[in-house]
Image (tube, rainbow, N blue to C red):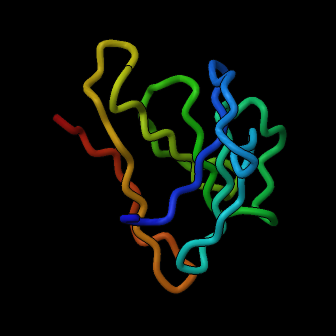
């Protein structure tokens, strides 16, 4: 009810989350093409021709970096951060088909 949501299955998700939740998803926001996948290693080659941003989360370790012309974002975890880190989320600001900023934000 608050905002659109795109979710993908994680490696420990065995329940049925409905017909709209898959292992990967594509969404375009503000003209920026996002690809969402749980494990970055499941993606294969980074292809800037297909997406601008890849969001993954398997490691639960927050990171924002560029590789092969693609912005890689792992928001970390609000509930189960790894490596002694704090709970985090990622904020990616987009407008007119461009990523304006991407940052990791601690919560709690």
Query: Is residue 97 shown above or below 22?
Result: below
| In front of the other: 101 or 15 | 15
From the image, which quarter does the C terminus lie in?
A: top left
Query: Is residue 30 shown above or below 89?
Result: below
Q: Residue furthest top?
A: 84
In the image, taking residue 72 as reference, residue 60 lies left or right, namely left
| In front of the other: 26 or 18 | 18
| Quarter-of-image position of residue 32 | bottom right
| Count of labels in the image | 0
From the image, which quarter does the N terminus lie in?
A: bottom left
| Quarter-of-image position of residue 62 | top left
| In front of the other: 11 or 57 | 11
Q: Position of residue 105 (x, y in %)?
A: 27, 45
The structure residue drawn at horizontal position 25% and vertical position 25%, both measured from the top left corner, is 86
| In front of the other: 36 or 99 | 36
Q: Position of residue 23 (x, y in %)?
A: 75, 39
The structure residue drawn at horizontal position 80% and vertical position 63%, both measured from the top left corner, is 50
The structure residue drawn at horizontal position 63% and vertical position 50%, both measured from the top left corner, is 54
In the image, taking residue 68 as reference, residue 106 lies left or right, namely left
The structure residue drawn at horizontal position 42% and vertical position 60%, both measured from the top left corner, is 92
Q: Residue furthest left?
A: 108
Q: Position of residue 25 (x, y in %)?
A: 71, 52
């Amino acid at each position: 009810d608050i905002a659109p949501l795109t979710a993908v299955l994680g490696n420990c998700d065995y329940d049925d989350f409905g017909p709209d939740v898959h292992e990967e998803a594509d969404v375009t926001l503000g003209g920026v093409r996002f690809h969402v996948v749980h494990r970055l290693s499941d993606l294969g080659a980074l292809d800037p021709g297909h997406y601008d941003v890849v969001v993954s989360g398997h490691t639960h370790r927050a990171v924002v970096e560029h590789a092969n012309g693609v912005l890689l974002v792992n928001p970390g975890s609000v509930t189960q951060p790894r490596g002694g880190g704090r709970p985090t989320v990622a904020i990616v600001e987009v407008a007119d088909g461009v990523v304006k900023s991407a940052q990791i934000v601690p919560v709690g």
